[in-house]
Image (cartoon, rainbow, N blue to C red):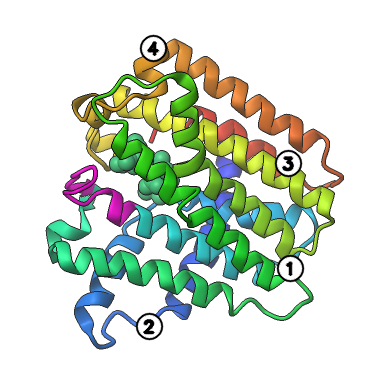
Amino acid sequence: MQESLAQEISLRCNLVEAKLQNLLPSIDSAPATIHQAMYHSLFAGGKRIRPVLVMAASEALGGDREAALYAACAVELIHTYSLVHDDLPCMDDDDLRRGKPTCHVVYGEGVAVLAGDALLTAAFEVLAKHPANGAPVLDMVRHLAVAAGSQHLIGGQVLDLEGEQRQLSLQEIERIHAGKTAALLGCCTRLGAMSAKGSEKQVELLAKYGFKLGMAFQVIDDILDATTSSEQLGKTAGKDEKAGKSTFVSLLGIDGARDAARKLTAEAMQALEQLDSDNKQLLVDIADYLLERNY
Ligand code: IPE
Ligand code: IPE
Ligand code: MG
Ligand code: MG
Ligand code: MG
């Protein structure tokens, strides 16, 4: 990653870290176990790309940075909950996440399920605290609920589970990726745009950019699973093949998957080109970086 982009991202990540700490109960609040488990997964060193996308989309429309932070924290809470549950023995059964033992390995399955539930619930509490600056907060809450719900994130996870040990078509894999990953990324840029009180056209273009980027993001995740070490990823590598998952890589090979990720990123950029904004360089740079990322 370019030094200047790394600085732009880290500046926003620091704001998100501080706001998350500020909005959540402290780690030693009673009952201590649940808060320790939540902090274990939330502050383990994720890339925080989703909250950064919320903020960058808001900034592209001249939004207030402090206001956008609430939606930024909310999407990271949803994302982290989805990882805690994704790693459970009854799902992907992973013992490494963000470079640390997974939540259920440290705290047991019962507490890990509840930590996921608590992170999910906290997301809506946090988003509802969005300052009253004229942004359509109730619609934002609804969009986040839909993106995280049974027809998108959870629906995608269901299809992902049901697809194990079966050879899926490209269309079926696209549907899984759209649900489990792209819906939330599309919601990130949508919420950023809504927090900045963007026009309907601006909101839809930014949501499209985020969705296409999310599709590319999951294709790259599948490529990294097949090509990169667990140390580099901070999570177990080579799991998709072992679990018999159909992915862009299993269907198209590494080169074919990389072509698909490039095409999806180009589609994200096209949406951005149509956006009426004079501050979209950060969104362009993030899209380029996500295509080249190595963890
Ligand atoms: C991993 O997401 C799960 C997917 C949806 C592919 P990230 O790669 O953003 O994970 P963290 O947040 O950096 O740990
Ligand atoms: C996870 O997809 C998507 C969600 C958590 C919603 P993966 O199962 O591919 O993510 P990793 O590879 O475990 O991070
Ligand atoms: Mg999974
Ligand atoms: Mg997984
Ligand atoms: Mg994966």
Q: Nearer the viewer, residue 262 or 149?
A: 149
The kind of secondary structure element at disc 1 is loop
Picture disc at residue 253: 4
Label 1 beta carbon within 8 A of ligand 1 = no
Q: Residue at x 65, y 59 (%)?
A: 191
Pointer 3 residue: 281
Kind of residue sitting beneath label 2: Pro
Expressed as whole percent of the image width and height from the top left, the position of residue 56 reads: 67, 52
Kind of residue sitting beneath label 1: Asp
Q: Residues within 10 Å of mark 2 (few under 14, many from 20)?
A: few
User: Magenta segment: does it hold 75?
Assistant: no
Q: Is residue 47 in view from this perspective?
A: no
Pair 1/4: label in front? 4
Kind of residue sitting beneath label 4: Gly
Which quadrant of the picture is home to ligand 2?
A: top left
Pair 2/4: label in front? 4
Pointer 1 residue: 64
> In 3D space, how far apart are the residues under numbered discs 2 and 4 (Cα atoms)?
45 Å
User: Magenta segment: does it hold 93?
Assistant: yes
Q: Vertical placement of 277 versus 159: above or below?
A: below
Q: Which residues fall within the magenta stretch? A: 83-96
> In 3D space, how far apart are the residues under numbered discs 3 and 2 (Cα atoms)?
36 Å
The kind of secondary structure element at disc 4 is helix
Residue 236 position by quadrant: top left
Expressed as whole percent of the image width and height from the top left, the position of residue 271 reads: 75, 35
> In 3D space, how far apart are the residues under numbered discs 1 and 4 (Cα atoms)?
43 Å
> In 3D space, how far apart are the residues under numbered discs 1 and 3 (Cα atoms)?
17 Å
Pair 3/2: label in front? 2
Q: In the drawing, does residue 274 fall left or right of residue 4?
A: right
Marks 1 & 4, CB-CB < 8 Å contact: no
Q: Residue at x 43, y 75 (%)?
A: 21
